[in-house]
Amino acid sequence: MAFNYKINLDNMLGIPEIKAKVMVPVMTKLVIGVQNMVRDAKKDSPVRGGHRTFNPNQRIGGTNRQSISWKREGDTLAVFTTSGYGGYLEVGTKGRNGGRGMPARPYIFPAYERNKTPIMNSLRGLI
């Protein structure tokens, strides 16, 4: 499950020299916002007991929480999880053969919702 936010300054500015001057501060603000979003998503990620190995000092559970991260590819920032089941936690599952399935327990989208206004406010005056 990934959240992508893409900003295309070509449409707004059109002049490469201006874009180059604006892009660094814009991406800096966006990266700070995405890092805050990841922090909130980790805080909100569902965690249950899980299993313990023979090491009594090992944490129980939290695999999805630990796998939440972000990356930048060009002008795109993505928040994602590599646990293999983070998307199922976010959106839930549909039961098979009349089964109940698993209800959604969103954690990435609420983190986005909490951080989108601060991110947009931080961009005011830069563009």
Image: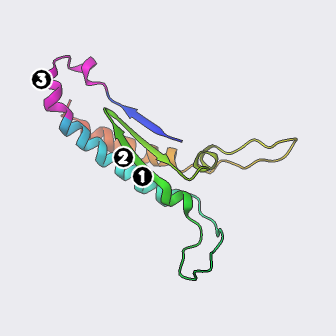
Residue 61, placed above or below residue 11: below
Looking at the rendering, the stretch of residues picked out in magenta corresponds to 8-23
Q: Position of residue 125 (x, y in %)?
A: 18, 34
Could you give the CA–CA distance between mark 3 and mark 2, rounded to whole angstroms? 26 Å
Q: Nearer the viewer, residue 88 or 12?
A: 88
Residue denoted by label 1: 38
Three-letter amino acid code of the residue under disc 3: Glu
- Chief SS of the magenta region: helix
Position of the N terminus by quadrant: top right
In magenta stretch: residue 59: no
Q: Residues within 10 Å of mark 2 (few under 14, many from 20)?
A: many
Position of the C terminus by quadrant: top left
Label 3 or label 2, whichever comes before in sequence order? 3
State left or right for residue 70 relative to residue 47: left
State left or right for residue 31 relative to residue 19: right
Q: Report the residue at 49% width, 56% height from top.
A: 67
Residue denoted by label 3: 17
Q: Position of residue 40 (x, y in %)?
A: 44, 55
Q: Report the residue at 59% width, 49% height from top.
A: 84
In magenta stretch: residue 16: yes
